[in-house]
Amino acid sequence: MSAAAKLAASDTLPVWNLADLFPGPDSPELNAALAAAATDAQAFEKKYAGKLDSLSGAELGAAIAAYEKLDERLSRLTSYSDLTYAGDQSDPAIAKFYQGIQERVNAAASHTLFFTLELNRLEESDLAPKLNDPALRRYAPWLADLRSFRPHQLGDDMEKLLHEKYVAGKAAWTRLFDETMAGLRFDVDGKSLTSAEALHLLSDRSGAVRKTAAKAVGKTLGDNARLFALITNTLAKDKEIEDKWRHYAAPISARNLANRVEDTVVDALMTAVQQSYPRLSHRYYALKAKWFGVDQLDYWDRNAPLPMADDTNVPWSAARDTVLEAYGDFSADLAGLGKRFFDNPWIDAGVRPGKSPGAFAHPTVPSAHPYLLLNYQGKTRDVMTLAHELGHGVHQLLAAGQGHLLADTPLTLAETASVFGEMLTFRKLLAQAADPQRRKAMLAGKVEDMLNTVVRQIAFCTFETRVHAERRNGELMPERIGEIWLDVQRESLGPALRMHDEYRHYWAYIPHFVHTPFYVYAYAFGDCLVNSLYALYRQTPDGFAEKYLAMLRAGGSKRHKELLAPFGLDASDPGFWRKGLGVIEGFIDELETL
C-alpha cells in the first residue's frame, strides 16, 4: 500500500463540501446566479458607462459599492468552478463545466470592464475632492492600487479584446498544463502513481525508493518535455507581447506592481538571498553530505530524512491537534478561527487520481469562507503544510471584514500568515523534543523547509527571469530550458549536490511558472518577514498577538510599509533581509554544534 492508502485506512481524511457556494453544478441556484450576473452586468454598464466623471463623491462611492457587489457574485461563481475542477481535473464533464463557467463569467465581466478603465482616466485633480466624501474614501486604498496601473492601461477596445480572449488564450494553456499533470502517471517499481505520490517518495527513508521515484519522475517529465516546453514558450511569448504594449520595464514588473512592492525592494531581496547561497544552502548540504558519509548527495537525497529522524506516520487527527495547539499557544482567537476549518467541511485532504497536486487555500469571497486543498500523506512535512495553508485560511477569514475589493492581500504579505503558522507549529514541536538527536533531526528538517522556501524559490525566480529573457530572442528548445534549470540549481544549491541528467526536466512540474509568473519570490519575502516578526515576538511577546491580528485584518487596505511600521520593520532596508536570513544561518550554526 502507498503511504496515502495506509493513512486513509487508519484515519478519516476530510473532504470539502462546496454547497456553501452552490448546491451543485446543475443546481437552479447556480443557473439563476449566472443569468442574474449577466443581466445585472449589462444594467450596470448602461447606468454608468461614460458617466463617471460627472458623478459626485457620494455617487461614485455608491457606484463602486455596486461594482463590488457584482464582482463578488462573479467571483463566487468562478470560485465554485475552480474548486470543483481542482477536486478532479481528469473528469471531462467537470472540465467542460469549469470552462463553461469561465466563459460565461468572462462574458458578463466584459460589461463591467469599462468601470475600472474609466476610473483610471479620471484626472487626479478631479478625483481628489471627491475622496472627501466618506462613501468614496472607504475605497481609497483600492483606487490607489487600481490607479497604479494607469501608465500601463491600453485603449478600451484593446482592453476588452484582451479580456475576452483570455479564456481562449492564457487560461486555455493553463488548463492544458493542469489536465496534463493530473493525467500523468509515474511508474515506480511497477506502481502507477500520481505526481503527488511520486514526489512524496523523494522524502522516503529508503535511498533506493528515493532514487527509483526520482528517476521515474524525471523520465515521465522528460517524455512530456516537448509539450511542457510548448506551454512555457507560448505563455512567455504571450506575456512578452502584452508587456511590450503595456510598457513594463521587465517581465517581473507587472508582478511587482500587483504585489504593491517596489522593484528596488524585490531586487534587494533577490540580491541578499543570492549572496547568502554559500552561507546557507551550500554550507547546509555539505553538512548533510557529511552526516550521510559522502562527499556529494544525489539530488534525490536533498530532502532525505536524517538517520535519526522520526518518520512515524502522523494521523490526521494528531496533525490537526498539533497545529491548533500551536496556534492556541500564540492566540486563542487565531486557534478559534483555525478550528472552524475542522469543524466544518472546508478541507479536502486526501490523495486521489485527478485531484490537483500540491496544496492551496482558496479565499473564495467574503460572503462565504475559504477552502483548503491538501494532499496529506502523514509526514511531518505534511503537518507543516497543514499549518501553512491554515495560516492562509485564517488570514482570509480575518481580512474578509474589509469587503470584497479590499480583502485581497498582495502575494508578498499573503505568505506572512502561512509561514508564521508553520513557525508556530515548528517551535511547539521543537520545544517538546527532549532528545538531542530528535532535536537535531527537527532542526535539519526546518532548515530544509526554509531553504526550500527562500533559496529554492529565489532560484525559481532566477530561472523564470532567464527563460523569459531568452524567449525574447526566439523559442527555447526543451533541452535549453533544462540547461537553464540545471545552471540555476547548481548555483543555488551548491557543489555538495550531484545533479543527474534526468533532473533537467524537473522545471516542468512547477505550477507557479504557468499559473502566476514570478509568484515564487513571495515565499522568500514571507519567510524573511516572518523570521523578523517571530524574533520580535520572542523578544517582546506582550501585545504582539494583537498587533499581528490587526495586520492580518487589514487585508489589502494597506501597503507593506504601513503594515510593518507598528513592528518597527522596513522591507526597503537591506538589513531587513539580512536579519531574516540570519535566522536560517543561526539554525545551521546550532546544527553544527549538535
Image (cartoon, rainbow, N blue to C red):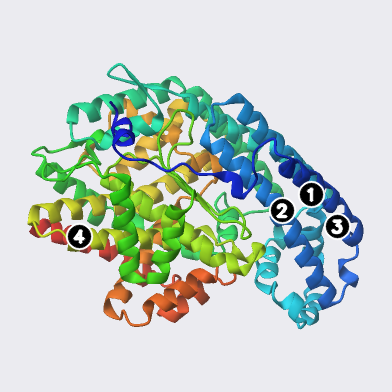
Asked whether the beta carbons under mark 2 and mark 3 sit within 8 Å of each other, the answer is: no
Please state, as top left, top right, bottom left or bottom right, where the C terminus lies in the image. bottom left
* Amino acid beneath label 2: Arg
Callout 2: SS: helix
Between disc 4 and disc 1, the foreground one is: 1
In primary-sequence order, the first of circles 2 and 3 is 3
Q: Which mark is residue 73?
A: 2
In primary-sequence order, the first of circles 1 and 2 is 1
The residue wearing badge 3 is 44
- From the viewer's perspective, tell me whether residue 310 is left or right of residue 299: left
Q: Quadrant of residue 428?
A: bottom left
Give percent across and percent down for residue 199.
34, 33
In primary-sequence order, the first of circles 4 and 3 is 3
Cα gap from disc 1 to disc 2, whole angstroms: 7 Å
Q: Is residue 525 visible?
A: no
Q: Which mark is residue 37?
A: 1
Q: Is residue 92 above or below residue 44?
A: above
* Amino acid beneath label 3: Phe
In primary-sequence order, the first of circles 4 and 1 is 1
Cα gap from disc 1 to disc 3, whole angstroms: 10 Å
Q: Is residue 528 visible?
A: yes
Q: Which of 348/248 is in front? A: 348
* Amino acid beneath label 4: Leu
Cα gap from disc 4 to disc 1, whole angstroms: 51 Å
Between disc 2 and disc 3, the foreground one is: 2
Give percent across and percent down for residue 440.
13, 54
Pointer 1 local density, CA inside 10 Å: few below 14, some 14–19, many at least 20: many
Pointer 2 local density, CA inside 10 Å: few below 14, some 14–19, many at least 20: many
* Amino acid beneath label 1: Ala
In primary-sequence order, the first of circles 1 and 3 is 1
Q: Which mark is residue 430?
A: 4
Q: Which of 503/195 is in front? A: 195
